[in-house]
Image (cartoon, helix red, strand yellow):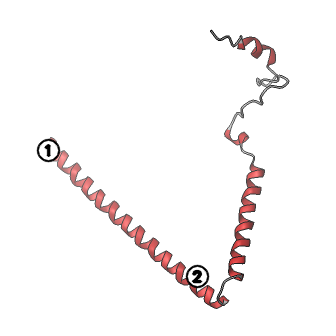
Amino acid sequence: MSYAGSTTRLRDKARSGDGRFARRGAIEPIADTAHDSVDWGRMAAFAAGILVGAIAGASTALLMAPQSGWETRDQLSRQARRVRGRAVDTLDDWGYDVRRKARKTRRRARRALNRDE
């Protein structure tokens, strides 16, 4: 049989004025809200680091490109047009699928209502 001891005795002795445990060597209390548990300063520093890294990487890639600046810009614009065209096609396909499924659902609902009458 395992004995962990009384937790109420420790809890009553260790309470501080704000209701959190304040024992020496105790584990820090869990944050009261989600906002308290996020260090926004560190999060901003991390995001800034990612942004600086992305800018440095992009500029290095452009400087080390095996073609001239005009050719690189032309290639990037062609790729951007292709990506845009694919995105438009995908959205059109999704819209078509949603409209088709909505029509089927309306038909099924009408049939079910007509059967019940």
Judge left or right: residue 113 versus residue 63.
Answer: left
Q: Is residue 68 above or below residue 115?
A: below
Mark 1, other Cα within 10 Å: few <14 / some 14–19 / many ≥20: few
Along the polypeptide, which appears first: circle 2 or circle 1?
Answer: 2
Amino acid type for the residue under numbered disc 2:
Leu
- The answer to which of 109 and 57 lies nearer the viewer is 57
Identity of the residue drawn at 65% across and 86% down? 66
Residue that numbered label 1 is attached to: 115
Q: Which mark is residue 90?
A: none
Q: Residue 76 carries which label?
A: 2
Tag in front: 2 or 1 = 2
Residue 72: percent from the left, percent from the top?
62, 86
* Secondary structure of the residue carrying numbered label 2: helix
Identity of the residue drawn at 75% across and 30% down? 29
Q: Is residue 107 above or below residue 66?
A: above
Residue found at the very far right of the displayed protein: 24
Q: In this view, does 111 lie above or below 82?
A: above
- Looking at the rendering, which quadrant does residue 107 occupy? bottom left
- The answer to which of 57 and 102 lies nearer the viewer is 57
Question: Which quarter of the figure is the C terminus placed in?
Answer: top left
Amino acid type for the residue under numbered disc 1:
Arg
Identity of the residue drawn at 80% across and 14% down? 13
* Secondary structure of the residue carrying numbered label 1: helix
Q: In this view, does 47 lie above or below 84?
A: above
Residue 98: percent from the left, percent from the top?
34, 60
Residue found at the very far top of the displayed protein: 1
